[in-house]
Image (cartoon, helix red, strand yellow):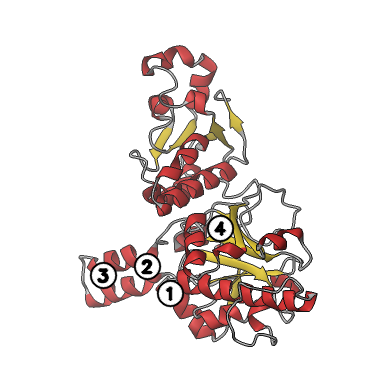
Amino acid sequence: LIVHVTNIQDALELWDASCSKNDNGKGANNSQEESETATQQLLRQQKIEKKALTSLTQSFFPGPLTLVAKAHPTIPQILMANTGYVACRSPSHVIARALIDAAGVPIAAPSANKFGHVSPTRAEHVMDDLGGEDVWVVDPLLGCLERERKEGNGNNAGVDEVGDNNAVCQVGVESTVAKIEMYRHDATEISGGLLGSVSVLRHGAISSRSIQEALEKAGLAQYFIVSDAVRYTSEEVNNVAPGQTVKHYSPNVPCFMIASERQRDRTLHEQVEQQLTQEERDILSQSVIIDYSQQLSRYKEHSLAYRDLSPEGNASKAASQIFDTLRWSESIRGANRVYVPDLSGIAESANNSDQESEALVLAVKDKLTRAASGVVIGTFQ
């Protein structure tokens, strides 16, 4: 479970390093003596970790970053999935923040959808998944619609305004998840000056490069290795952060990734007819294609339904629509399969993009990969 807060101090109190009683308030000292004792080394690590947590929360809270760090001893086990670590983020959405403030305490909660199903980005998505359960749904459109009805205003201007700003998630995909982990005080890495690592466990709108730059700005980059550590695990594995199982964000229709050799620019467009067997044409006629940057556009006319997340390859636009589009694919009558492109090649070239685009391309690739349970095929089957 991720703990949601509205202020940085509430976040810091969740983590062990931030609540250390041994911190004398001084900054980290780069010129530690070689004879430093184990206790001194441990205290030094705690100071550095606290400074890193403070820096990253100040840089990215509120916003689409979840930080994972060693939990304070008072944190309940149910929040840690038996890992000893706790995850925290500060949402920027006005209604989420109002709900947390009204509660008067941090709120620990999962996503409002059935496990493994497509994440919700609208209140109606939550009702689709959980409408039969004993749940309350806060819908930002309801108050506006009621006001419009009472005022007799038929132009729905207020609805449009609220819908644009509050009804739909601003980024469209879940937050980046980054785990801060300090090395044991006797680890060999410490001899080189490194004290820990920051691992990106889930791709979102904040890139590993942005995290690296925030640490550099705080004078902490020399103490940490920042790297991507996204995993694809089975459902039986206890993960410190959500969204790491290989089957996740999956529509209620079998979903597969189409290998790069069957995508755009691999062969001449006019060869499509020769490429497709009669069996593949029959299968496509009962299938939905969710595309990105026109990678599978050549098969559009053969499909039952087709939608491109962003024909021009705009990662921000694609991210904002991906979950809504995956849910749309479930609504297509007669659809037996959903096909999406394998975006490995596009993700590799994203390093030349700006940081937000790079992060969101990786996020879109990750969501499509998990929607298809990681299965890549070279034929429509």
Measured Cα–Cα span from mark 1 to mark 2: 8 Å
Q: Is residue 135 visible?
A: yes
Residue 274: percent from left, percent from top = 45, 11
In the rendered image, which residue does mark 3 sit on? 158
Q: Residue at x 71, y 59 (%)?
A: 189
Q: Secondary structure at mark 1?
A: helix
Q: Residue at x 57, y 44 (%)?
A: 371
Measured Cα–Cα span from mark 1 to mark 4: 21 Å
Residue 294: percent from left, percent from top = 38, 33
Measured Cα–Cα span from mark 4 to mark 3: 27 Å
Query: How packed is label 4: few (under 14 Cα within 10 Å), some, or many (20 or more)?
Result: some
Q: Is residue 299 above or below residue 252?
A: above
In the rendered image, which residue does mark 4 sit on? 129
Query: How packed is label 3: few (under 14 Cα within 10 Å), some, or many (20 or more)?
Result: some
Q: Give the residue type at disc 2.
A: Asn
In the rendered image, which residue does mark 2 sit on? 166
Measured Cα–Cα span from mark 2 to mark 3: 12 Å
Q: Is residue 353 above or below residue 255?
A: below
Q: Is residue 326 left or right of residue 47?
A: left
Q: Give the residue type at disc 4.
A: Asp
Mark 3 and mark 1 lie on one chain; the one further toward the N terminus is 1
Q: Residue at x 38, y 37 (%)?
A: 293
- Tell me the mark number nearer the camera, choosing from 1 and 4: 1
Q: Give the residue type at disc 1.
A: Ile
Q: Secondary structure at mark 3?
A: helix
Mark 3 and 1 residues: CB-CB less than 8 Å, in contact? no
Q: Which mark is residue 95?
A: 1
Q: Nearer the viewer, residue 10 or 46?
A: 46
Mark 1 and 4 residues: CB-CB less than 8 Å, in contact? no
